[in-house]
Structure formats: structure tokens, C-alpha cells
Image (spheres, rainbow, N blue to C red):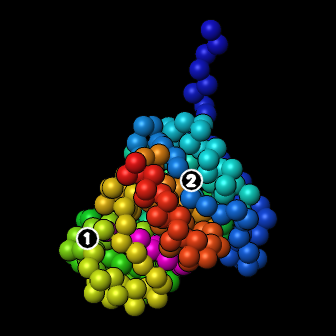
């Protein structure tokens, strides 16, 4: 047998991103935008293993080719699709958080991981390691390109770094009484979905802060951890295989992934609900 190549680096070098202009730069998005069902190694919690923005997507290493091809087929023409680890783990989506302006990684991320990600993303995206005791940044921070909702107990320095690196307004918030804002909501520049037990008053307050429409909902057949079960940007979304057609319809509607008249959405939701109950 040939000897193993021990000179191959852990991360393969990725050339600077040179695809066609990204959607938010050219003012249009790919046609037929929709939500996709995927699974990472028998887990439906897609958001645990993926960080998705309008400028790039980070994927955990060790997934199946089916998993990677779903993202590369939908996003590869528009943004860099980067396979990496964070702090030596596959929990990319729970340990990192980012938007079109930047990416925050925990202080446990290695120098090699940091360099690999920096070399793979567009040059104007700031990649910063952050010294925060609540190191699961994806659980503690939810953001789009303009606003971030953070765990009430994050350090003041962390709050300032989030504002500077991501270029957002920062608000300390809870979602339905839950302090893990990144776990219990997911929002883009167009809309968002929050914990199903969020009150109407809280939703109105959050919608006013974010300046986008919100809906209370679930993923993966009733799971309330919508941040862990769903990732989305301004033109597509990915959720677990267990997500029902009703949940898919809500996701596509609130994130404006399809140009469907409101009456058509209501009719579709009723049909989907009847199918589910049947």
C-alpha cells in the first residue's frame, strides 16, 4: 500500500473568492428561491453545523456529499462555501456568528482555523476572535446585517465588538423569556421566526427593534429551537428533514423566499395543515 501523505494540511487553501457579484451587490437574487430540507449526519439541527449569511457560508467538516452539494448547488455560484471546524469541533453554527460585514469566532478557535476562514472569505469581511466567557456565540447572538440581539449577560466589551465588527445596532434581549437569543430565533433582513411561545407584545417590540415582520413558529415537526433547526439569508433557507410542509410554508412566507400572494399562502397553509392532521 502507498504511504499516507502526511504533508497534506488540515485545511486545503481556498483561493480568494472570485465568483460573480454577490446578490446584495448586484441587486437581484437567484430565481426560484425556496427553503430546502437537509440533514447533517442524522441530525436535523442544521443551524448547529452551519453559519449562513448573504456573503458566505461556513459548513462543518465531516458531513456527507449530499449535505455539501445542497449548499454548493444553491449558493456556490454566489458566495464562498467554506468547510471548516471551530475550536476543533463541528459546532460551527453554535460557536460562530456573522453577517455581510464580519464574522465573530470564540477565543477557543485555533490560529489555523482563523487563518483558513480569513483566506476563504471576501477581503472586506472582518474575521475577529472574541474573548467572551459565553463562548457559544451562535447561541448567545442573533443578527442580520443591521441589528443584533444578544444574551443579557454578555460582557460590555463583547457588545462593543459585535457593534464594531458586524456593523450593527446591539440590543440585550430575551425571546419568550429565554436568554439564548441565537437559539430561539432566526431572522434575516426581510423577516424572522421566533420561539412559538413568544407573546404578541414581545413580538411587536422585537419587530419594532428589528424593523422587519416576525412570526412565532417551529421547525423539525414542532421543535421550538428555531435558531438551531434553521439557517437563512435573504434568498434561501435550509432546515431539518423533519420540517413539515406547514412549517416550510411559514418559513418561505416570513423570509419572503417566494413571491406568493397572501391569500395563496393562507390557502396553502390550510391545505398543508389538513394533510398533516390526516
**261 to the left or right of 130:** right
The disc label shown at residue 36, or none: 2
Give the SS element for disc 1. loop
Label 1, residues with CA under 10 Å away: few <14, some 14-19, many ≥20 = few
42 or 142, nearer to the observer? 42
Name the residue carrying label 1.
Answer: 197
Magenta region, residue range: 187-195
**261 to the left or right of 47:** right
Q: How many marks?
A: 2
Which residue is rendered at x = 59% and y = 38% of the image? 66
**221 to the left or right of 188:** left
**Spot occupied by residue 237 in the image (x, y as percentages of width and height):** 55, 61
Question: Is any atom of residue 86 visible in this view?
Answer: no
Looking at the image, the residue that sits furthest to the top is: 1
Residue 269 on the magenta span: no
**137 to the left or right of 59:** left
**Spot occupied by residue 25 in the image (x, y as percentages of width and height):** 72, 77
Which residue is rendered at x = 62% and y = 47% of the image? 70
**Spot occupied by residue 250 in the image (x, y as percentages of width and height):** 47, 66
Amino acid at each position: 500500500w502507498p504511504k499516507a501523505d502526511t504533508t497534506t494540511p488540515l485545511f486545503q487553501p481556498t483561493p480568494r473568492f472570485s465568483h460573480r457579484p454577490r446578490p446584495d451587490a448586484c441587486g437581484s437574487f437567484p430565481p426560484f428561491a425556496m427553503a430546502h430540507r437537509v440533514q447533517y449526519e442524522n441530525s436535523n439541527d442544521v443551524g448547529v453545523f452551519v453559519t449562513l449569511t448573504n456573503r458566505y457560508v461556513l459548513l462543518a467538516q465531516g458531513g456527507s456529499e449530499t449535505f455539501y452539494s445542497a449548499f454548493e448547488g444553491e449558493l456556490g455560484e454566489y458566495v464562498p462555501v467554506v468547510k471548516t471546524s471551530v475550536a476543533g469541533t463541528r459546532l460551527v453554527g453554535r460557536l460562530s456568528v456573522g453577517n455581510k460585514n464580519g464574522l465573530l469566532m470564540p477565543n477557543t478557535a485555533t490560529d489555523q482555523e482563523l487563518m483558513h476562514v480569513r483566506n476563504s472569505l471576501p477581503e472586506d469581511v472582518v474575521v475577529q476572535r472574541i474573548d467572551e466567557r459565553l463562548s457559544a456565540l451562535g447561541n448567545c447572538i442573533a443578527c442580520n446585517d443591521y441589528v443584533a440581539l444578544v444574551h443579557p449577560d454578555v460582557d460590555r466589551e463583547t457588545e462593543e465588538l459585535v457593534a464594531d465588527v458586524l456593523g450593527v445596532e446591539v440590543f440585550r434581549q430575551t425571546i419568550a423569556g429565554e436568554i439564548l437569543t441565537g437559539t430561539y430565533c432566526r431572522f434575516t433582513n426581510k423577516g424572522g421566526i421566533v420561539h412559538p411561545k413568544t407573546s404578541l407584545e414581545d413580538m411587536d417590540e422585537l419587530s419594532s427593534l428589528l424593523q422587519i415582520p416576525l412570526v412565532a413558529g417551529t421547525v423539525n415537526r414542532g421543535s421550538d429551537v428555531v435558531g438551531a433547526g434553521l439557517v437563512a439569508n435573504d434568498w434561501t433557507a435550509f432546515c431539518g428533514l423533519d420540517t413539515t410542509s406547514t412549517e416550510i410554508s411559514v418559513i418561505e412566507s416570513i423570509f419572503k423566499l417566494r413571491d406568493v400572494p397572501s391569500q395563496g399562502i393562507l390557502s396553502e397553509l390550510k391545505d398543508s395543515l389538513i394533510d398533516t392532521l390526516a
